[in-house]
Image (tube, rainbow, N blue to C red):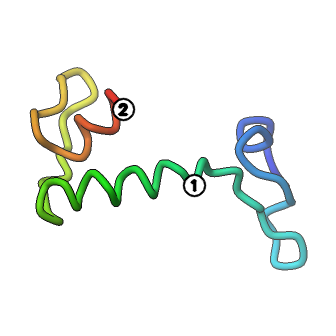
Amino acid sequence: MATAKHAAKASGDGTKAKPWKLKTPLRAIDDLHAMLKAHGDWMPLGGADEQKPAADVTVEAWGTTA
């Protein structure tokens, strides 16, 4: 059963009969694709500790500032 936390991001029960239907902003995927193309199709993902800023020129840094 979907929890209150998931209710805003998805509909459905999360079961096989009623799977979650995500409300993902699909434009973010297109924006990420365009950004990767502009950087030559590859850049580090990043992976900073939550208490540290993301390293420059990483997907993580782009995602937190985009």
Element at label 2:
loop
Residue 41, x across and y down, in percent: 17, 66
Q: In this view, does 19 lie above or below 22?
A: below
Q: Residue 26 carries which label?
A: 1
Residue 39, x across and y down, in percent: 13, 54
Q: Is residue 16 above or below residue 1?
A: below
- Residue drawn 11% across and 62% down? 40
Q: What residue type is labelled 1?
A: Leu
Q: Which amino acid does label 2 sit on?
A: Ala
Q: Residue 10 carries which label?
A: none
Residue 8, x across and y down, in percent: 76, 38
Dot 1: few (<14), some (14–19), or many (≥20) neighbours within 10 Å? few
Q: In this view, does 29 lie to the left or right of 34?
A: right
| Pointer 1 or 2: first along the chain | 1
Q: CA–CA distance between discs 1 and 2? A: 14 Å
Furthest toward the right, the residue is 17
- Residue on which disc 2 sits: 66
| Quarter of the C terminus within the rendering | top left
Q: Which of 19 and 26 is in front in this view?
A: 26
| Quarter of the N terminus within the rendering | bottom right
Q: Nearer the viewer, residue 33 or 6?
A: 33
Element at label 1:
loop
- Residue drawn 77% across and 62% down? 20
